[in-house]
Amino acid sequence: MDYNALKVILEREEIDFLDLKVVDLAGNLRHLTLPSSYVTEKVFTDGIGFDASSYHLSSVESSDLVLIPDATTCFKDPFREATVLSCFANIHIPDRERSPFPLDSRFVARKAEALLINKIRGAISYWGPEYEFYLFQDFTYEEDALSLKWKITPLEMIGEGAYHADLPSEKLAQFRDQACKILEKLKIPVKYHHHEGGGLGQQEIETCFEPLLKTCDDALLIKYVLRNLAQRENLSLTFMPKPIYGAPGNGWHVHCFLKDEERNLFYSENGAYSNLSRIALSFIGGVLKHARSLCAFTNPSTNSYKRLVPGFEAPTSITFGRGNRNSACRIPGYVSEAEETRFEYRPPDSTSNPYLCLSAILLAGLDSIEKEIDPVKEGLGPVEENSFATCHKEKLDFLPKSMEEALDALEEDHEYLTKDGVFPRSLIERWIKVKREEAREIFLRVHPVELERYF
């Protein structure tokens, strides 16, 4: 869609505002709203200036950047009282050419997709995420240097058997119905929704396969819809990886395969394991080889590592296997058709920046395809039983146990990300700096259990 086509929509639909949605470094949405009378062709050529240091994308000394709307992503915002047309915006440098800003997450995703096509002619990566989240009646939080208090008030307490629980035990199917109807109107295809295993209100919505950039845009819009709908219904919603001690955590499992114009490149009728092609196994091998450094982008919060522990069907071992939910890479055991052959990468959670998360996974796979890494020969699987139960028999490697450990791994292992300039070194350096500061700030806070044990 060009500017002229957008102008027709603004006038025909009597749009009050054009809202530009932008992604900061952490993967959070920011936005800037323009009256439709201000929207001229110049907005789409020169852009709108903003302070990038507030997005953690640059220092204060060099923070002047510009936003240019991506008119192909327009949608009517269902939560604004005025008639608002929203779209994503790309970040550019204010030079004469309006060059793309290298640290813009959407630009990184576009470069990752272009690299795939360059390496495997005509190939597109397809992604199908699972969105896990909790819904509570209420959540309150108070904290200062002398006190700390929080309280979660559950809306339901199902206990055992919460997975796929039915009405009237589960009380949130209506919420998921409403959410999915909104998502469908926004052209975000939903596969299904259901109650997840956490009996205190854990939910899941799974979406259909889409290309990388569309999947990432959808990820932010899904969070936007769910959070706004929860607020409208006076509920508290969280994607936090481990909001409740002893309860199942929230993951952002992503299913993935590569496809060209004719076929699923991950399928082989004569595949040595579960009908996976040589390309598929190599891709999995690269993801596992780089799994520890990938965690810096797939699990970029201190809370992420409270989820990646044994006992909750969370991934812990750097292995692959059919139907094994303890392995980082799971091959779905129920897939029988060629076009659905794929793997599921289980570590990610929704504290990730989806653009950086999926781009990093794609680059790890491409690095391995180029080097023809065989995960079987590397001793990474297949493992088709509980990984912790076999760790005394085999030398298994495990995912990092903290964000600091993941950042250490990224410092040592990031060449596969910087290949062909997809991830600029400056982005990796800034990510490590910002995340280490975040980890230090949280580490310095006094924990309630410390007071209980040591005060």
Image (cartoon, helix red, strand yellow):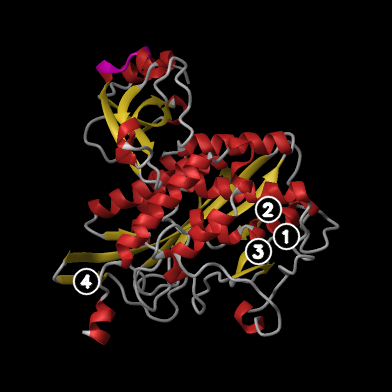
- The CA span between labels 4 and 2 is 43 Å
Q: Is residue 259 left or right of residue 81?
A: right
Residue type of the residue flagged with mark 3: Pro
Q: Earlier in the sequence, mark 4 or mark 3?
A: 4
Please state which of residues 222 and 279 is positioned toward the viewer in this rendering: 279
Mark 3 packing: few (<14 Cα in 10 Å), some, or many (20+)?
A: some
The residue indicated by pointer 2 is 340
The residue indicated by pointer 4 is 151
Residue 165 picture location, percent across and down: 43, 72
By secondary structure, the bulk of the magenta-drawn segment is best described as helix
Q: Earlier in the sequence, mark 4 or mark 2?
A: 4
The boundaries of the magenta stretch are 37-41
- The CA span between labels 2 and 3 is 10 Å
User: Measuring 59% from the left and 45% from the top, which residue is drawn there?
Assistant: 417
User: Measuring 74% from the left and 69% from the top, which residue is drawn there?
Assistant: 379
Disc 3 element:
loop
Q: Which mark is residue 336?
A: 1
Instruction: Please tell me in which quadrant of the rendered image residue 136 appears.
Output: bottom left
Q: Are marks 1 and 2 in contact (CB under 8 Å)?
A: yes
- The CA span between labels 1 and 2 is 7 Å
- In the image, is residue 121 part of the stretch drawn in magenta? no
315 relative to 350, above or below: below
Q: Nearer the viewer, mark 1 or mark 3?
A: 3
Q: Is residue 290 left or right of residue 28?
A: right
Disc 1 element:
loop
- In the image, is residue 39 part of the stretch drawn in magenta? yes
Q: Earlier in the sequence, mark 4 or mark 1?
A: 4
Q: Nearer the viewer, mark 4 or mark 1?
A: 4
Residue 319 picture location, percent across and down: 66, 68
